[in-house]
Image (cartoon, rainbow, N blue to C red):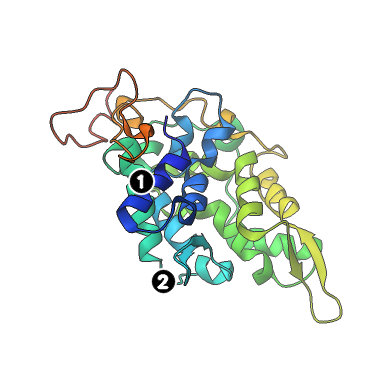
Amino acid sequence: MSHALYHAESSAERHGGTPDDYLALHALIDAPQLHVRMPSVRGRAVFHHTWGIELCARLFACGANGTLSLREQLPAAMRGQSPDATARAVANGHVQEDLRDVPTLDDWLAVLTPPRCIENNAHIPTADQALLSSRHYGGNPESYAPIHELLDAPLRHATIGNASAATALLHNTFGIALCETVFGHYIVVGEEGERQRIPTRYIARAHIERECGRFVPTLDACLADLKTLPWMGGRARSLSRRSGAGRLREGAVEPQSQTPAVAGANQE
């Protein structure tokens, strides 16, 4: 399985600069892999698809020095700020290098059965989650909305029939860690003179507990019943020509035709 460093080396060859300019974005895409039992491709279900690419394009921006880093004004980025073209191209390249083709979020969700703690509990609208946070901690619901919007983002990009499976992607311990990575360890709420710091982790955890019966599952548990298929990891495209990491994994076979990566997603 490819390491984020090798993806970064490949990006530097394609787009210029150094691997360090791209490493943060690639590390984020591969971060879920650290939250599932290895070896497994199940962690790719979180970001290795069209929605994951668009999320990276909104979270990351290319600075004047050419380095891709998390945007400074993330709430604005989550509310529809123009996606960064370089970040989108780099994220798209990462997915293609791992899967050869780019699946949709629904292609993954179609073969994912969510855990009972998610399937048996009702979804709370994002706006209501923000309101509940403001009532508990104080301040305006708008201060909490970006965190709740990130946790619920997969739901807005999945079909209605895949709602529970979409919830499973970030309603877990990894989703909490992602919120801390994106928004920092705390947010500041309240009016001038009455401002207070609220840990991001507390807000995200409460969101998940409200929808999972006062329980926070691990990402590994949420993806335990994902049916793994060949297109999820057996046809990686070569990476950096400069490093030895560019070779196909041992035992992998280079396909002779561009068969759609998700062709077997709905087959038994």
Q: Give the x, y percent position of residue 74.
A: 57, 67
Mark seen at residue 10 = 1
Taking the image as shown, residue 145 lies to the left or right of residue 85, namely right
Between 204 and 119, the one lying in front of the other is 204
Name of the residue lying farthest toward the front: 242
Q: Residues within 10 Å of mark 1 (few under 14, many from 20)?
A: many
Within the image, what quadrant is residue 150 found in? bottom right
- Kindly state the secondary structure of the residue where label 1 is placed: helix
Q: Amino acid at mark 2?
A: Ser
Q: Give the x, y percent position of residue 45.
A: 44, 37
- Marks 1 and 2: which is nearer the front? 1
At 40% from the left edge and 38% from the top edge, which residue is drawn? Answer: 109
Q: Amino acid at mark 1?
A: Ser
Name of the residue lying farthest toward the top: 251
Find disc 2 in the rendering and name its residue: 82
Within the image, what quadrant is residue 257 found in? top left
Counting residues from the start of the chain, the first of labels 1 and 2 encountered is 1
- 137 lies above or below 23: below
Q: Give the x, y percent position of residue 232.
A: 35, 31
- For the residues labelled 1 and 2, the Cα–Cα distance comes to 25 Å
Between 207 and 258, the one lying in front of the other is 258
Taking the image as shown, residue 112 lies to the left or right of residue 240, namely right
- Is residue 222 shown to the viewer in this render? yes
